[in-house]
Image (spheres, rainbow, N blue to C red):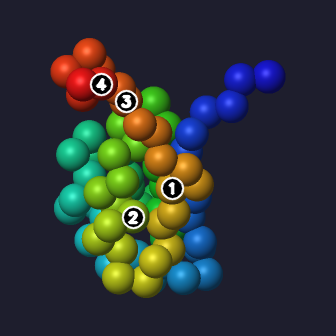
Amino acid sequence: MNATAQPEIDRDACDLCGECLAACPTEALSIVAGRLEIDLEQCGYCGDCEDVCPKGAIRLPYQIVVVTEDSAD
């Protein structure tokens, strides 16, 4: 089974303020029928939405670390 990292939304905490929509560089977030939705194919898992959410309603369960040859020194 392949696990894919995806942000988690606490729908009880989310008040649909739109801060995450404005912060998302890939425009993966939208409000559909009164609910925050994430397009997982567009999501780059950057964490910007988690950082700006004033209610803490978006959480990235773990952080992905990319190691390049330049950063391995």
Between marks 2 and 3 in the image, the one whose residue lies nearer the viewer = 3
Measure the alpha-carbon separation of dots 2 and 1.
7 Å
Q: Callout 4, which amino acid?
A: Ala
Q: Callout 2, which amino acid?
A: Glu
| Mark closer to the chain start, 2 or 1 | 2
Residue 66 numbered tag = 3
Q: Residue at x 36, y 54 (%)?
A: 47
Between marks 3 and 1 in the image, the one whose residue lies nearer the viewer = 3
The C terminus sits in image quarter? top left
Measure the alpha-carbon separation of dots 3 and 1.
16 Å
The spot of residue 43 in percent (x, y) is 40, 39
Neighbourhood count class around disc 1 (C-alpha, 10 Å): few under 14, some 14–19, many 20 upward: some
State the residue position of label 4: 72
Marks 4 & 2, CB-CB < 8 Å contact: no
Neighbourhood count class around disc 2 (C-alpha, 10 Å): few under 14, some 14–19, many 20 upward: many
Location of residue 22 by image quarter: bottom left
Between marks 4 and 1 in the image, the one whose residue lies nearer the viewer = 4
| Mark closer to the chain start, 3 or 4 | 3
| Mark closer to the chain start, 4 or 1 | 1
Q: Measured along the vertical axis of the image, is residue 59 above or below residue 14? A: above
Between marks 4 and 2 in the image, the one whose residue lies nearer the viewer = 4
State the residue position of label 2: 50
Residue nearest the viewer, comparing 4 with 34: 4
> In the image, is 19 to the left or to the right of 11?
left
Q: Measured along the vertical axis of the image, is residue 70 above or below residue 33? A: above
Q: Residue at x 47, y 47 (%)?
A: 63
Q: Check the image and name the residue furthest to the right.
A: 1
Location of residue 68 by image quarter: top left
Residue 60 numbered tag = 1
Q: Callout 3, which amino acid?
A: Val
The N terminus sits in image quarter? top right
Q: Check the image and name the residue furthest to the top.
A: 69
